[in-house]
Amino acid sequence: MLIYDLDLPTLTNLLQKWDEPAYRAKQIWQGLYQHLYNSPNEFTNLSKSLREKLTERLDFAPLKVKLFKDSSDGQTRKTLFALQDGHLIESVLMRYDPNTNLGRGRRTLCISTQAGCAMGCVFCATGQMGFSRHLTSGEIVAQVMYYARALKDENLAVTNIVFMGMGEPFHNYDNTMAAIDTLNDADGYAFGARRFTISTVGLAPAIKRFADEKRQVNLAISMHAVDDKTRVEMMPVNKRYKISEVLEACQYYVAQTSRRVTFEWALIHGVNDTPEVARKLASLLRGLMCHVNAIPLNPTAGFEGEGTNKERALLFKETLEAGGIPCTIRMRRGIDIQAGCGQLATEN
Ligand code: SAH
Ligand code: SF4
């Protein structure tokens, strides 16, 4: 059993079964998530016999580092992990220089929720590899703990967590939310709900369920096209949930939570980066509390499309904003380390 899979009540029950006093569970929880202990030996506040029990009965090491790559500017690190059954997943840390105005001193961690992905988006390296399995909540949490430990050595911490690595978080809904609950726990890692962002391909029923839970977590929708014909070609899931259904679920989300939705837009040269598309997108989104996050497509082996250049990206943004929809253009990061979702795992 993986220790990061347990929530505090379950851990408390387990220790009770081991005839340990209740406060021990809290000590272990704090050791894991406040002190970022990595192995039972570090829990020097526990008895030797309890440390032995922990070693024998629980697993502390779900992820094995296969390799990591730093971008040439040193701001982005991508780590490839092997799960215990050998499946590979990736997580990426993106640092934003404190001396620039954009995202002053942010350290955003991009984590995976599945090994592979079942959604099959044609432009996505993870989609191209297919689905292997869901991650457990503990395997999701462990990615954060790995980077939290690494940053602690520099007296730094993760400031934002985005579920934009491999996999579709709403296809693995329960484990993703359990991971958020663990990381958010006030007696543990206490990572603020508002600093998480879930990105989804647009599973409408899950968007509504998420809206009903009224979490403070940010929601991003991968849109990429303004008409169903184009979107189906890019994202097969659109056969099941059409653009109108996704937008209807987004309306519901905004009504339930009063929170703004982000729409992700991978700019593909000549496909979805024209002023005409931008105008259509503006009219589609008008009246919805939202903004658009556009990023030039990161090229992948299995897809021919090319990323939009800076000039066209800016024109897209201007056209969208003239239509009343705020837009930010993100430039690709870590391109020299295959930091696009799934790209390092594909190579290996
Ligand atoms: N499955 C979720 C989250 C992981 S993908 C989702 O699809 O939203 C995170 C983001 O990266 C999504 O917006 C996805 O559309 C985008 N993406 C995937 N492949 C890309 C590529 N090659 N270039 C640019 N963005 C890409
Ligand atoms: Fe899956 Fe997201 Fe990639 Fe689509 S873009 S295949 S949903 S990971």
Image (cartoon, rainbow, N blue to C red):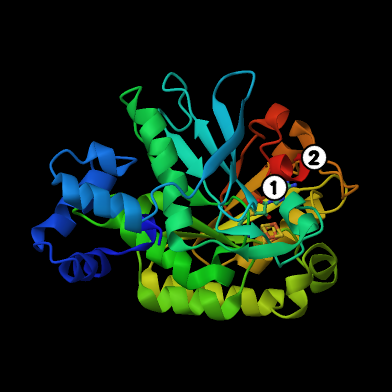
Q: Amino acid at mark 2?
A: Thr
Q: Position of residue 330 (x, y in %)?
A: 62, 38
The residue under label 1 is 342
Which is closer to the viewer, label 2 or label 1?
1
Q: Which disc is residue 263 wearing? A: none
In the image shown, does 208 or 63 lie closer to the viewer? Answer: 63
SS category of the residue bearing label 1: loop
Q: Residue 331 occupies which quadrant of the picture?
A: top right
Residue at 32%, 59% (x, y): give it: 182
Q: What residue lies at 85% left-to-right and 44% top-to-bottom?
A: 269
* Residue 168 sits above or below residue 332 on the image: below
Residue 263: horizontal and vertical position, in percent?
A: 60, 58
**Place of residue 76 in the rendered image (x, y in percent of width and height, measured from the top left):** 56, 29
- Label 2's element? loop
Q: Is mark 1 within 8 Å of ligand 2?
A: yes
Find disc 2 in the rendering and name its residue: 308
Ranked by sequence position, the earlier of labels 2 and 1 is 2
- Quarter of the image where ligand 2 sits: bottom right
